[in-house]
Amino acid sequence: MMRAALVTVFSYIVMFHQAAAYWLMGANNVITTQRIDPVVYPGVVSSHVHAVLGGSNFGLNVSTSSLRQSECTSIPIVEDKSNYWYPQLYFQWSNGTFTSVSGSAVIYYLFADAPGNTTAFPEDFKMVSGDPNLRTLNASSFAQQAVTFLCLDFNGKSSRYNELPSNRCPSGIRSQINFPSCWDGKNTDSPDHMSHVSFLSTGPDNGTCSDPNFPKTLPRIFLEVYWVTQFFDNFRNQAMTPKQPFVFANGDPTGYGYHADFANGWEAGILERAVDECNCNPYGDPTCCAAKQIFTIDQSKKCFISNTFDEITMGTLATLPGNNPVQDTCYEDFVDPVTPPVLSPVFVYNGTGLTPSGTVATPARTASVSQTAQGSCVRNAGFRSFRPLYSSGIVGIIFLAFGGSIMNLYI
Ligand SMILES: *[C@@H]1O[C@H](CO)[C@@H](O)[C@H](O)[C@H]1NC(C)=O
Ligand SMILES: *[C@@H]1O[C@H](CO)[C@@H](O)[C@H](O)[C@H]1NC(C)=O
Ligand SMILES: *[C@@H]1O[C@H](CO)[C@@H](O)[C@H](O)[C@H]1NC(C)=O
Ligand SMILES: *[C@@H]1O[C@H](CO)[C@@H](O)[C@H](O)[C@H]1NC(C)=O
Ligand SMILES: *[C@@H]1O[C@H](CO)[C@@H](O)[C@H](O)[C@H]1NC(C)=O
Ligand SMILES: *[C@@H]1O[C@H](CO)[C@@H](O)[C@H](O)[C@H]1NC(C)=O
């Protein structure tokens, strides 16, 4: 982990020339891995699984005021109870099953050196970067340039790609995404969760907020996820697609559909002060900002929440949760007919104390299918005869009892 963080700092400085203050922090843990996305699918099950970081009041609906009430956060900056989420990565075996890949995240905040030039996120600010339905690259689109992958080799050369690398990465794969950092100054969200913000003038990590429609400079969030894909290197010959065996939760084996969401849960006033004054370390170490009492750092505190949906999302699964078909080269809309049972209550725990358990509050529902993915988009169509593992209440409770430790099974 320490080594990964050092490589992170190094590659960042080499890659980007723009002088800007920043800090970076490795998240203490993923709080939950579920089909929940309160920005794109508020109140209902999401189409695919996300790994979630941040405040424990994450759920089907979030607001800045509810996140501020979180009992804990997995961000080491204790005052940051925001949520950040991104699709879970899986390895697909030749028999069609999927095994989750362990991931850990580093979050960067970048901002102007001059105090007063960066505007903190307003209350209830939300945004999405990336598009889960993309399966091709438009190299001139800033939104697509915002997504990159690093094929890590700590003993050699790490290379950057616009897609999931198709060669072995001896030290793992890092997915990286920039969020837009210019704001219209008015809307805290928009129907597509993107059009209230835009990227910098000359690229997702480079330029200024010179477009008069997006005059306000926000802190730029850059999210890196380090996936332990090297664990699977010895099993590549047993993969469905040995050349590139990994697939994101949205059924994307290309990486072009990688995306991330942000919902602001910063405690009132803290981020404003931080973007003005937290420029005391050239390598992004925020310890000096904590020393200036801008915020508090705790890198030991774990924070987990139990499942809202009674659905197994980690380990080895017969299908991707939500039955998402693996779609290559193109994308066709797909809606799973089944809604998993809803469990209640949701428990907050730190992985060592409480053993959480839940009871089914709302049973599974079946609706009619609006559209099924078909045709040339679906990869390995013959294997879709596997039925999804719709978990029973009993299985769900067993999963909950294992809680956060399930993440470590595949390291
Ligand atoms: C943008 O990036 C390019 C290449 O990475 C660099 O040459 C240029 O100076 C950067 N521009 C700004 C405004 O930082
Ligand atoms: C969550 O938000 C959705 C969409 O705004 C709304 O329909 C639903 O009632 C909300 N659910 C809760 C529990 O607040
Ligand atoms: C598929 O293969 C994986 C890996 O060998 C194995 O763990 C799993 O049990 C198999 N599943 C089925 C349904 O055969
Ligand atoms: C800060 O903003 C002022 C006024 O817009 C501008 O002149 C100056 O160049 C900015 N400084 C930095 C470091 O961005
Ligand atoms: C690619 O992106 C550019 C810049 O956003 C856009 O102008 C263009 O229409 C896009 N091309 C296609 C084929 O979507
Ligand atoms: C977890 O919570 C328990 C009970 O509240 C507490 O005693 C323990 O110190 C906590 N552990 C960590 C690592 O925070």
Image: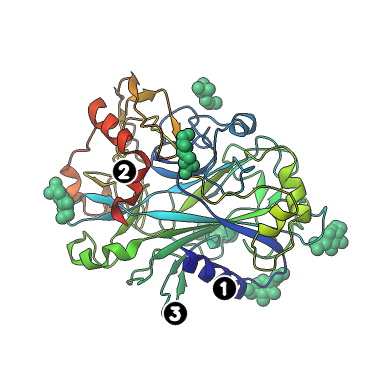
* Mark identifier at residue 10: 1
Judging from the image, what secondary structure is the residue with disc 1 in? helix
Of the two numbered discs 3 and 1 on the same chain, state the one appearing first in sequence: 1
Type of amino acid under label 3:
Lys
Q: Nearer the viewer, residue 306 or 112?
A: 306
Which residue is at 40% across, 64% downward?
Answer: 173
Mark 1 residue type: Phe
- Going from the N terminus, do you reach mark 1 or mark 2 first? 1
Residue 95, horizontal then vertical, whole percent:
15, 53
Q: Does the rendering let one see residue 152?
A: yes
Q: Position of residue 307 (x, y in %)?
A: 38, 32
Residue 324 shows which numbered tag?
A: 2
In the drawing, does residue 275 fall left or right of residue 249? right
The amino acid type of the residue labelled 2 equals: Asn
Q: Nearer the viewer, mark 3 or mark 1?
A: 1
Q: Name the residue under label 3.
A: 157
